[in-house]
Each structure stands twice: as structure tokens, then as C-alpha cells.
Image (spheres, coloured by chain):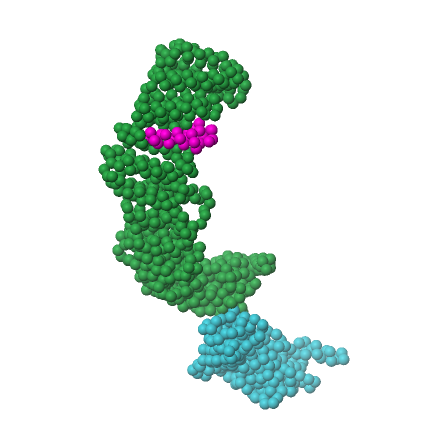
Chain colours: A cyan, B green
Amino acid sequence: MAVLLNLVQGAPIIDIYLDGLDTRKTARFNDKQQGLIRLPVYSDDDDISGVVDLRMNKNKKIDHLGIRIELIGRIEILNDQKQSSDFMSMGRELDAQGILMEDKTYKFTFNKFEKQYESYYGKEVKLRYYLRVTMNRNYGQVKKEIEFAVQIVDKEQENQPQTSLKLEVGIEDCLHLDFEYFKSRYHLRDVVTGKVNFYLVKINIKYMELAVIRKEQIGQGNNQQTDNETLVKYELMDGCPQKGEVVPIRLFLSGINMSPTLKNVSGKFSVKYILNLILVDDEDRRYFKQQEITIYRKK
Amino acid sequence: MEEDQEKYLEDARKVVKEQAYFMRASLEKAQLKDALRYSSAMLSELKTSLLSPRNYYILFMQVFDEMRILENYFKEEYRRGRKMPDLYESVQHATYVIPRLYLLITVGSVFIQTHEIGAKVILLDLLECIKAIQHPLRGLFIRYYFLKLCKDRLPDTGSEYEGTGGNIDDAIEIIIRNLSEMNKLWIRMQGSKDKSKRERERLDLKVTIGENVTRLSNLEGVSLDTYKTKVLPKIIDIITSSKDAISQTYLMDCTIQAFPDEYHLQTLQELLKVCTTQLEPTVDIKNIFINLMGRLADFALNNDMGTFNSEVDIYSMFKQNIDKMLDSNSQIEFKNLLDLQVAFLNFTLRCYPSNSEYVNDILKSCCRLCERQNETDFTEECQKNIVKFLAMPLDTMSLSILTMNEYPNLMKHLPFQKRRQVAIKICQAVINLNQVIDDLKITEELLKFIQPLLITQNDYVEIPENEFEEEQQLVARTVHLVQNADLAIHNTILQQFIARFQQGEINRQKYTYPAAIFALFRLLQLIAAQGGPQTQETSYKVLFEQIRGLIDVLQANFPELALKLNLNFLLCINIVDQAQEFDEFSYDIGTQVITIFQDEIGDSNVKVVLLNQIMSTFAKLNCISGENFDTLAGNATQQAAKLLKKNEQAIGVINAAHMFYNENIKNAQRVQECFKKAIKIANQSIGNNPKFVYVFIQILNKYFYFFEQVEFKEAEIQEVIKIINEKLPKALQDNDEQSKKIKILWTATQELVRERKRRSIQAYQQINI
């Protein structure tokens, strides 16, 4: 037992330092386990490079079976670890089997590593990227991981023509309106604009609000699980309009913690965004209509 | 409910105060984010649905003041380098629409001031966003806030925001849009429940809507032309597109009040057309017209009347439109139409004071209107208006107005009491005009109109005595206005009055006859002054007989009045008949006086007074020959001796002396007889009543009066003095009223004698008192 303790206390320390962090853009994520985190962001053709710093930590010498660094992309299903899996993994050998007698530093680079998916930290699922350094020894490993984020600018979305989303809804003899969002696709700092036309109002509306819902779909087919989370509620109208009134919609997305729309990521999950227009009457009955929008990342 | 309201308000005000405190504290520490959070919490109080409009206003004003602080801070932030577009966006992240928009308007106002963006862009954007507030009360107030903050940020002509910030058209457009939306919200407040309460609440809020119109009128760029082509049509559009009477009424009124009269003059036709054809039937068009006419009349009177008369034919415009209203089978109440007519008449009288044709035309319309009504439509209110209608022209126009043929047509719609009122008003007007009544035709009409005062008509209603007296006195005063240089006409006019008075029964004649009689006296004097009668009708005989006839009528019921009238009659004859041509006639009148006195007057006090008048009147007469006069004067003296009290008898008799010695007659003997008789009567009483010395002192004084004309026996006078000296101490013993009177009279008498002696008047040297 004493030996074991000694071993643990004396384990060598591995640190990973990424290059150019002072100039690299960072992004904030709300991770379920870690809370609010801030990660460096890699996109396009970015390389990821840095140094691995290995310190002896009072050990005189260290026998090891090899030191590796891996870049891993992983999808984690929070409620079902069995479903979690790596969608990518790249490795580099930093040091072959041998004996270390002193602190040592290794440089590493992953040139233009593949950035297939956006980092995503959701409620039930996350897609994360991290670097992992492993020193294998006879009696166990010494590991170090650091997370970073990948963001993908979707140039295709940007260039596609916009269509407006228009929908006519109503309850016979009671309520008749149409609403229109001028665009169907929005970048993350975009503004949702549109209008609501009231044609018939026989109920006593108290207010109207717009909610942004994030829909996480995990798995496929019969096993698919869906989680809806309301990210924001935004009051659009106070009071009851008369027929003929046109109430504007204007919602700034920049204040909302969103990701781009993610579709069938690695066959594991999707993230969709939905605008939910809700009318509440004076008896707190809610009348709503949902409309999916596409969110993308813009340069 | 009311208590709840107070509590709700108090609670809300407390929260506002608290949050405002935190907001300011944050601003002092330059923590904008916190300040916005607190201001948001403060503004959230305006989300309430619990407060009445009045209380909401109080809360609003409290918040408004706090927001000024925030606005100033935004300005400072800008100077410190804060990017306004960022701030403009970031306040829009607020979850709730009320705080969000109040903040947005506040930032927007500062944003405009930076000139980094066109005023028009921001203002239009704000207007668009405000559409989110569909709740009537909250919507009205946020738009009111918009107006207040943006009033100096409009791209008005000559403003610093004109140019890239837009132009006057944009400024107009912005306010008009706000006005239109506010008007809709205001109308929506009406709802369906609790109508009158809602209406009251709505009226409490009207100034917030009116603020838009005020803003429009304050715009430098709104010239007459702009007003005509761009502003007014849009306002009219808003007014007519709503079907709400309260809104229409208020906005019309507001427009009239806010813009210069000159503009109204140039757009009168449009305004009137809207009023008469496009408003809801329950709109009080009358009031709108009254305001409009009032203002235009003021304008006309304060400015060049020339413009008023030539450039635009205001009268005709009003006339046409009002007539259109009358003739369209609209649902406007009769009462309101009448009110309108009255206002129009008033306007016309003010602006066209000499145009009686206009007046008659209006009367015509009014008649037409009245003809169409059922009898039951003539409510008290309506009758009052008709009364006004008939009386008003008289205040400013000449009497000739009475000859307008429409006058009687209107009058016939009124019941007795109202006709009587009109009659009174007419009389008053005639008197106030202070013009002579010199025209036969006018007299004829006048008498027709005041007939309710002159005869007992079919629907006569008994009137309280004092009112009756007042009205009859008005009639009496009217008669005195009769005059014409041609005395024959003068007489004819007077006779017209008298003819009516004769139908008026004794209770009216009591007032009208004396007036007529005095009018005849005056006529007689005028005739005499012109050298005597020119026509048969104006001969003294005819007129004298007429007067006698009139007095005779009164005699049975009002003997005292008849007596006095006869005395005046005598004085009148005395002026016109110096030649004693009517000696016998005058004598008869004199006899009549004595007869009435003797037979009809009972009250002894009245008798004393009347007899004095009789004797003083007789003393002035020269129209009765000597013999006849002696008889009359003797009779009067006898009446004196028949008075009730001895002192009255003695003094009466001594006063009779004046009838025998005056300008016309010098009969010393009769004077001496009067003295003797008076002393004799006085002597009978002095024995048991020393206070009778008063009478003796009066007799003594009367001696002094006649001293220089009539010769008296020295002894007689000394005897009187002796009695006085003897009785005086006793008479003055008591310190009562009578003694005081005696003392005063005696002192005065002594003073008189002393003074005369000083002037060395011979007769007084023997008098020692």
C-alpha cells in the first residue's frame, strides 16, 4: 500500500501547451459536467500544434513503453455511454519505449486535421475534440487530455438564396393569422425578422411570444430519443390586436447560446432549431406554431 | 375598488422608486449593464393592468422622470466612446416588450442626436417596433413617450436633423402614423362593457392623442400650403375612417384649436364638409361649429375685416353646410340642430353686424327646421333656443329686424311661457338699444311680439306678482321710447300702443295706462311747443278726452293712482292751455280730484300726503279761471279742516294759504283767513297738550313766509309768540322724540329771526323770541 501511494504521488506530470493561443479565437460552451468552459477554436485548414511537457516529478527515472499523442473526436451520449464513440482518432508517437532520466518536451503538429463536425455541447449529447497524451507503463498509464473546439464555417449556406417562411394558421371562427419569417436560414449572429398578420381575433390575447427551441435527436429509427430545450422566450406583443394589425418580429440571435444546425452527425444525433410562436389568451391557454429554421456559421 | 387603486399605485410607485435608486447608483459607478437591468425592472411596473388611466399616468410620469436620467447617461456614454448601434441592439435583447421598447426609444433619441444615423431611419424603426404594444392603455402611453422624446428630433424644416435625417414630409408622416395608431388604440379602449366608465376613462387620456396634433402644428415646415395639401387631408382621413364619435369629436376640436385661424379660413370648405357629411351622427357637430365660428369671429374682429369679407365667403360656406345638414335626413337631434343655428346666428351677428338679410336667411332655415318637427320635439331646451334665436338679433341689430317675416313663424312654435320670455327679451332689447320707436310698421310688429305681455292669450299661465310687475314695467318703459318728429305719426304710434293696452285688462292697465298717459302728456307738450295741434287727431280736446277716459278706467280699482294721474293731468293742461280754453274741462278734472279724495281715500295718513299734493298742484295752476279756482281751492281747504287729527287740520289749513297767494293769484284776504282758522284749530288743543306748540311754531314760520307780501295784524303774531313762549318749557320737559323735534324746529326758527334781524329787515324788528 505504501508503495502504491508512493507510485501515485510520484507519477510524472504531463502538460500539453497549444501554440498561438494568445491570438486564437476562443468560444464558450456550456458543458453539462464542467459548466461554462472556454475553448480555443480551430476551423478550416487550421493545424493544431503545440508542445507536450513531461516532468519527472521527483522520479529519478521512468521506464515507459512509449509516449503517444492522439487527436480524438468523440460523440458522447450522456445517458447512454454505450452509444458514445469516437468518430475520429489520429495518433503520433512522441517517444519510443525507453527510459526517461529527465524532463522532456515534445513538439507535435496535426496538419490540417480533418474537421468534419462542429464541436457541440448539448443537454443529452456532446461532440468534443481533445488531444490525449498517453505514457504507457508496465503498471498502468499516465494520461493527459485537453479539449479544444472545432467550428465550421458553412460557406454553402451563406451563398444559397433565402426563402421566407410563411404560414397561415387559425382556429375556425376564432383566430386567423399568418406569420412570416423573412428568412429560413440564419447565421449565429443573425436577426430573425418577420411579421404576424392578424386577420381574425375573437379570443382575448394576453400576449404573444417567440421561443427558440433546440431539439436534440439521438439515435435513429425506433430508438430515437428527442429532447427539446427552450433556449429563450421573447415577448413579441403585449395585449390583444384587432384584425388588420401587423406586429413585427425581431429577435437578435447573438444573445442566445446556439450552435449551427447539425444533421445526422455520424449517424448518432441531430440538433435542430425551431421557432415557436405562441399566443397566450387571458385564460392562459396557449396557441402555438413551430417552424424549423436552419442555423449556420458564418465567417 | 378605489382603495385598491390607491394601493396598487402606491405599490408600483414604491417599486419604481426602489429600482430607480439602484439604477442611479449603478450609473454613478458607470455600471451600464446593471443600470439597464434595474431600469428594466423599473419599467416593468408599466406592464401593470391594475391601474386606472389616471393612476397609470401618475406612474408613467414618475418613470418618465427617471428615464431622463438614463437618457442623459446614454449621451455621456456616447461621448466616452460607446457605439450607439451596439447599445441600440443590446437593449433589444430584453425579454419583455414594455421595458425593451421604452429603453429602445430612449436610446433611439440619443442615437439621433449623434447624427451618425438619419433621424427618419430611427424614428420609423421605433414606430415599427412600437406596434408590438397592442394593449390600448399601455400602447397609448408608450406612443406618448415616443412623442415626448422625439419631438425635438424630427427632421422638421430648419431643424438640425433635416437633410440626411429626412424632411418635413417625413416628420409629418411619422406623427401622422403615430396619431393614427394611437387613435385606433384609443377607440379600442371603449370595449363593450361599462360604457360610461370607459368613456370617462377615455376622455382622461385624450391629451395623449392630442399631443400628436399639437406636434404637427408646431412643425416649422407646416406652412399653409403644406397644411392644406398634406396635413389636413391625412388628419381628415384618420377622423373619417374611424367610426367613433368621441374620437371624431376630439380630433376635430383638437385640429381647430391647434392650427392657426388663417389656415382654417383657407380650408373652411373641407372642414365643414367633413363635419356635415362624414361624421357619426352622435358627434356633437354643434360644438365643433361653435368653436370654429367662435375662433373665426375672433380672428375676423381682431384682423382686417376686409379679408374676411372678400376673399372667402365664410357666411355662405357655413350656411350651405348647415343647410345641408338640416335637409339631409340625418339622425342629428333637433336640439343639436337648433343649438347649431343659434351658434351660427351668433357668429353672423358678430361678423356681419349690419347684414340683416343674413339674419333673415338664418331665421328662414330655422323655421324650415321647426316646421318639420312634431310638437313633442319642442322640449324645454329647444324652446330656450328658439327664445335665444328671436332675442339675439335685437341685441346688436336695429329694431327693423322685427319686420322680418320669419319672426312670427318661429314664435308660433313656442308655448306661452316661452313666448312671454321672448316678449320680455324683446322689450329688454328695445330698451337697451335705446333707440326711439318711430316707425309704424315696426311698432305693429313689436306689438305683435310682445302680445303675451299685453293681453291674456288662450294658453296664458298665471305668473308670480313680482314677475308680472317687472314685465309690465318693461312694457311701460317701451312706450316711452315712442317718438317722431312728425307729431301726427308720433301720436299714431302711441295710439297703437294704447289700443293694445285697452285689451289688456285692468291688472295690466295699472302699469300700462299711466305709462301711456305720461307719454300723451309728453306728446301734448311737444304739440304745444310746436305752436299747437296740426291735425284733428292731435287736437287738445281729443287727447284730453282720451286721457280722462284712461284715468277713469283706473279710478274704480286704483283711486289713489287715478287721483295722482289727474293732478299730473292738470299740470300738463296748465302747460299747454295757458289761455284757459279748457277752463271747464280742467275744472272738472279738479273736481274729480276732490271727489276721489273725499269718497275713495280712507287712510288718514294717505289723506294727509295726498292733500298736500293736491294743494301744491292747485297752487301752480293757471289754466282754471278765478271763480272756478276759488271753488276748487275752497273745497281743498275744507278737506284740510276735515282731516282726522287736529294738528293735521291746522297745518293743512295753513298750507292751503299757498293756493291763494302765488304767481297766479294774490288773495291776501284768503291767506289771512287760513291763518285765523288754523290758529283757531290749534288753540282748541293747546290747552290739554302743550306739545301742540309745534303747530304754533309752524304757523309762526308760515307767517314769516308770507311776511313781505301779506299784511298781518301785529297782535295776532304776538299772540302766537306768546303762546309759544308760554307752552314751550312744558313741551320741552319730556325728553322724548316729539320734544326733540320741537326743540330743533324752535332753534331753527330763532336762528331765522336772528338772521333776518341782522339783515335789518323791517318786519322782524318787532319779533322777539
Q: Main secondary structure of the magenta part?
A: helix
Residue A251 is a magenta residue: no
Which residue appears at 58% of the width and 89% of the height? Answer: A220
Whether residue B571 can be seen here: no
Near-viewer residue (B666 or A37): B666
Quadrant in the rendering for residue B763: top left
- Viewport quadrant of the C terminus of chain B: top left
Residue B609 is a magenta residue: yes
Residue range highlighted in magenta: B586-610
- Viewport quadrant of the N terminus of chain B: bottom right
Number of numbered labels in the structure image: 0
Q: Is residue B147 left or right of residue A171?
A: left
Which residue appears at 45% of the width and 42% of the height? Answer: B466
Where residue B57 sits: x, y (%)?
Answer: 51, 59
Whether residue A160 can be seen here: yes
Q: Is residue B488 above or below residue B716?
A: below
Which residue appears at 41% of the width and 53% of the height? Answer: B415
Which residue appears at 28% of the width and 35% of the height? Answer: B540
Q: Is residue B358 left or right of residue B643?
A: left
Where residue B759 sits: x, y (%)?
Answer: 36, 13
Quadrant in the rendering for residue B613: top left
Q: Residue furthest right?
A: A1
Near-viewer residue (B258 or B539): B539
Quadrant in the rendering for residue B249: bottom left
Near-viewer residue (B74 or B608): B608
Where residue A160 sits: x, y (%)?
Answer: 44, 83
Where residue B397 sits: x, y (%)?
Answer: 31, 48
